[in-house]
């Protein structure tokens, strides 16, 4: 855990980088999400931020008990990344899955990152020190589809008052040709039967008496994710 810091004082070394990150947040979001994300940041809704090699991870606390997780992956390079060099992702329902559109939680994370960079500009180089290839963009046909100009109701915010008849449009992801080819290769031959799986005996685990350890394990299981590179 790394609690976000607030810059203080007139002579801060990373002010230029911080301004560039805020501009980047504006480029990746519309006016509504930008305004809401800035409010989340100002109200200290970003409860955790970690700057790693190639990616920044932040937790944003909304009205739900479980915070949303934002990931900001940057391609290898130097300086603040351009929009094309950044892949953003959030666990909220408003995430488009394109990697190029920032929800309000992602905006809040970017503003919190700008604070960290204001204090410690060297963090930008760590962020750009990517040890993996940049995340590929989704199918261009999906990205080119018109996005609904509404805010899905994720229990944090209500829809704008000036849009009483707004509707949420669900976009269905197109088939991936690479996945289709893999499916053909893995297809079972004609007449093949599904395998028989043995029945598993239920496990009887004793409860963990140490409440601190139990809480740590519970948080770890809730945030567990497997990423296939």
Image (tube, helix red, strand yellow):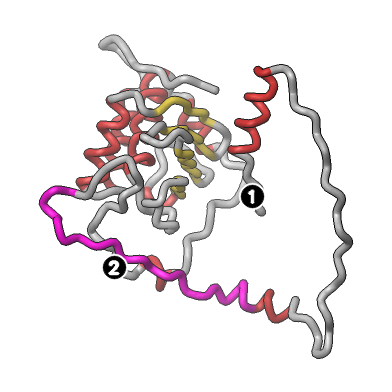
Q: What segment is highlighted magenta in the picture?
A: 160-180
Q: Is residue 168 above or below residue 215?
A: below
Q: Are marks 1 and 2 in contact (CB under 8 Å)?
A: no
The stretch drawn in magenta includes residue 168: yes
The residue lying toward the viewer, choosing from 207 and 150, is: 207
Q: Secondary structure at mark 1?
A: loop
Q: Is residue 224 above or below residue 40?
A: below
- What residue would you read off at disc 1? 227
Task: Look at the image and tell me in which quarter the N terminus lies.
Answer: top right
> Is residue 42 found left or right of 197 in the rendered image?
left
Residue shown at the point (41%, 42%) measured from the top left:
81
Q: Residue furthest bottom?
A: 190
Residue 205 rendering spot, x and y as whole percentages = 80, 34
The residue lying toward the viewer, choosing from 63 and 204, is: 204
Question: Which mark is first along the chain, 2 or 1?
Answer: 2
The secondary structure that dominates the magenta segment is loop
Residue 133 rendering spot, x and y as whole percentages = 59, 51
């Amino acid at each position: 855990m790394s609690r976000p810091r607030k810059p203080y004082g007139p002579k801060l070394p990373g002010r230029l980088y911080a301004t560039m990150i805020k501009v980047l947040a504006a480029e990746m979001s519309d006016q509504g999400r930008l305004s809401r994300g800035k409010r989340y940041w100002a109200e200290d809704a970003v409860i955790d931020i970690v700057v790693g090699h190639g990616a920044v991870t932040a937790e944003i606390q909304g009205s739900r008990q479980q915070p949303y997780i934002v990931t900001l992956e940057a391609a290898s390079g130097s300086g603040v990344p351009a929009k094309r060099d950044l892949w953003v992702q959030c666990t909220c329902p408003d995430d488009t899955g394109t990697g190029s559109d920032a929800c309000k939680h992602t905006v809040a994370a970017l503003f919190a990152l700008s604070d960290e960079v204001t204090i410690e500009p060297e963090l930008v180089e760590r962020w750009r020190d990517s040890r993996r290839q940049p995340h590929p963009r989704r199918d261009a046909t999906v990205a080119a589809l018109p996005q609904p100009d509404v805010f899905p109701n994720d229990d944090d915010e209500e829809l704008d008052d000036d849009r009483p008849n707004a509707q949420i449009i669900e976009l269905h992801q197109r088939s991936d040709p690479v996945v289709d080819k893999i499916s053909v290769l893995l297809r079972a031959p004609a007449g093949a039967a599904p395998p028989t799986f043995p029945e598993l005996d239920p496990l009887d685990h004793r409860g963990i008496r140490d409440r601190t350890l139990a809480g740590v394990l519970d948080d770890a299981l809730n945030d567990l994710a497997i990423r296939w590179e």
